[in-house]
Image (cartoon, helix red, strand yellow):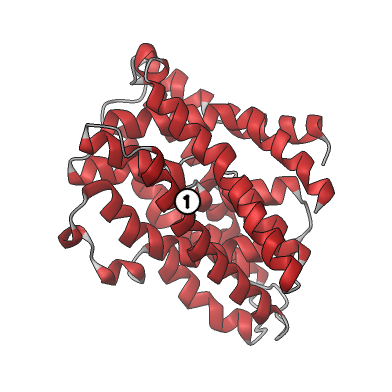
Amino acid sequence: MDFLSTFITVLIVVVLAVPGYVLRKTKILPDGATGVLAGVLLYVSQPGLMASSFLNKEFDAAMLVNFGWVILFAVVLILLVYFVSKLIFFRCKDEASRRACVACSYLGNVGFMGIPVMQMLFPGNDDLVLYTAVYNIAFNAMTWTLGIYSVTGDKKSVNPLKIVLNPPTIATIVVLPLFFCNVPVPEQVVTPIQYLGNMTLPLSMIILGIRLADMYPLRLVNDPKTYLASAVKLVLSPLLCLGVLLAVNALVPIDRYVIVALYVIAAMPTASSVLNFAEMFGGDCDTAAATTLMSTLLCILTIPVLMLLLGFV
């Protein structure tokens, strides 16, 4: 892919954080604004995004094979990067910080950035959007189980019901029968759902901007672990993903779009859910926040460079 066009696309995404930063710095947004906006994001816009990804898309039984590959590789690749990151950070003496670094290394911003970025990089390609939405099903299950455990280290914090009982997954479960049966949904229904879903990326970036405004600048740049965790998430993770996919593809043919979707997804920056879990369960919020912000800023360069490799796939 062309470096400049990809760079501009990713830059546009990150620039969406500026309003949140400015509004918070000027005190227009009060303390606690992130909690309110995060509630809208989790319970309204992200479910709308997931639902609109499937509504009025044409389903063919042949897609099931590719959906199966996506779910299988989603779980395998998440586990692979999880164990690799545990080896990388095992010397970190502070347990909470080590757990935050590991979580930041393998949990990507798939739910908020994945689908919108895929739509921007590959306009009009419904297959890639569908694969990203399917990936989110497996990713949400892993996030609410392995994600929580990796931040807390406590199995009791994991609620298996959250695998299904989270807003994006519930929305997906509701619309999947319509998708599989090719049931046409009136545009009067789809359009407002799409409007709500389209809020996901801007809203998530505004929240990121607010968090950046609340952070001491030196805290963002003076911890080597932040750079290492960002490097694992932004560089090592997608390269491992691509290597595994190409190795398997040499033995069993995999649809090229499946490889592209999984590779682009792996290149996403750290998910804000790591910080949310750290806040909820008493983890290392500073490391989680710094890595989430740093990886999002650095992805302006890493994603365009990584996309150049797609010319060899």
Residue at (30% x, 34% y) in the render = 91
Q: Which of these two is toward me, 69 or 168? A: 69
Please state, as top left, top right, bottom left or bottom right, where the N terminus lies in the image.
top right
Residue 107 seen anywhere in this rendered image of the structure: no
Name the residue at 71% across, 56% down: 260
Q: Which residue is mark 1?
A: 81
User: Which amino acid, mark 1?
Assistant: Val
Residue at image position (41%, 27%) is 226
Residue 51: quadrant of the picture: bottom right
Q: Residues within 10 Å of mark 1 (few under 14, many from 20)?
A: many
Residue 227 shows in this picture: yes
- Residue in the image at 65% along x and 84% along y: 183
* Left or right for 230, reference 32: right
- Element type at mark 1: helix
The percent coordinates of residue 285 (x first, y second) are: 27, 33
| Viewer-proximal residue among 155 and 4 | 155
- 135 is higher (above) or lower (below) than 88: below
